[in-house]
Amino acid sequence: MDQRIINLFDEYTHKPLKREDFLQRLTTLTGSTTAAMAVLPLLEINYAHATTVKPNDERLVIENITYPGEDTQMKGYLARPAAAGKYPAVVVIHENRGINPHIEDVTRRVALAGFIALAPDALSPFGGTPADAEQVRTYFGQLDAKKNLSNFVKAFDYLKGRNDCTGKTGCVGFCWGGAMANQLAVNVPTLNAAVAYYGRQAEAADVPKIKASLMLHYGALDERVNAGIPAYEEALKKAGTDYQLYIYEGAQHAFNNDTAPTRYNEAVAKLAWERTIGLFNKKLK
């Protein structure tokens, strides 16, 4: 697919670009309304591909939980191994689409690897992630940044208060959640490991606060996010931070999202996931 089309969709999903403006520009790029409508399903997510670990997998216990946030009750999707025992915990941070079947599936994948996995819903202050995608976009634009960060920080307080948690914690985030993973590395000094997939980097001045081991995954074609890599890596090196940074050739933004057909890269996603779980196994277990 024409890279200009993928870049346009990336702009639409990350900037305040109205849907009608997006569709008009897509029509211009494809040459006709008919062609634009044919391309659109290839760009938008398809949750039919969202299940790699079934919600009723007998190896897991699934819970819908709440915990205290800033002026709200935070909702979360939690998965953990069914076998009795204590496990380290991983916070799974969604994209700018909120909690959806894909993120729930990723949470189950983490749990199946031997962790308590919790995916907080950033849109809990609005009652949770709505079904309407345009309303989701509106709510994300209305989030209070400081309260939102605090709501995710408080997830670790909840997890460490569980009897089945060892107290060791990590996080993994994607896109919007990747940026949050970097922010949690800065703001949670007890965090053991943080993994950011194609997420905006933390400010260089904040890097010395990072105590966690970092793993950073980027798609080589993701020019928007990748522009911040040089300054971030320079700061990480200067601070002596334990980090690993991978840039995958030929990969787009959202290469891990198997419900996004034009951007999902199976080989890259598999490799990045193996590295991610490898880090959690090393630092949390």
Image (cartoon, helix red, strand yellow):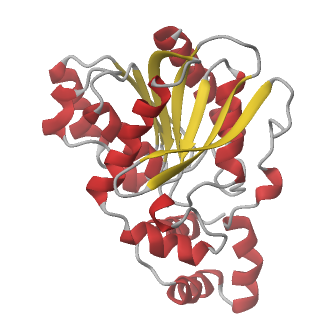
- Residue found 70% across the figure and 31% down from its top: 109
Residue 206 visible in the current orientation = yes
**Up/down of 261 relative to 258, above or below:** below
> Against 54, is 27 above or below?
below
- Report the side of 163 relative to 81 (left or right): left
Percent x, y of residue 45: 69, 62
| Residue toward you, 72 or 137 | 72
| 277 or 118, nearer to the observer | 118
Question: How many numbered tags mark residues here?
Answer: 0
Vertically, is 274 above or below 247? Answer: above
Q: Estimate the x, y position of residue 22 in percent, counting from the top left.
A: 53, 82
Residue 12 visible in image? no
Q: Residue at x 30, y 58 (%)?
A: 145
Quadrant assignment for the N terminus: bottom right
Q: Residue at x 53, y 69 (%)?
A: 4
- Spot occupied by residue 74 in the image (x, y as percentages of width and height): 48, 51
Residue 143 position within the rendered picture, expressed as x and y whole percent measured from the top left: 37, 65
> Residue 269 is drawn in which quadrant?
top right
**Residue at (16, 26) in percent of width and height:** 208
- Relative placement, left or right, of 164 versus 233 is right
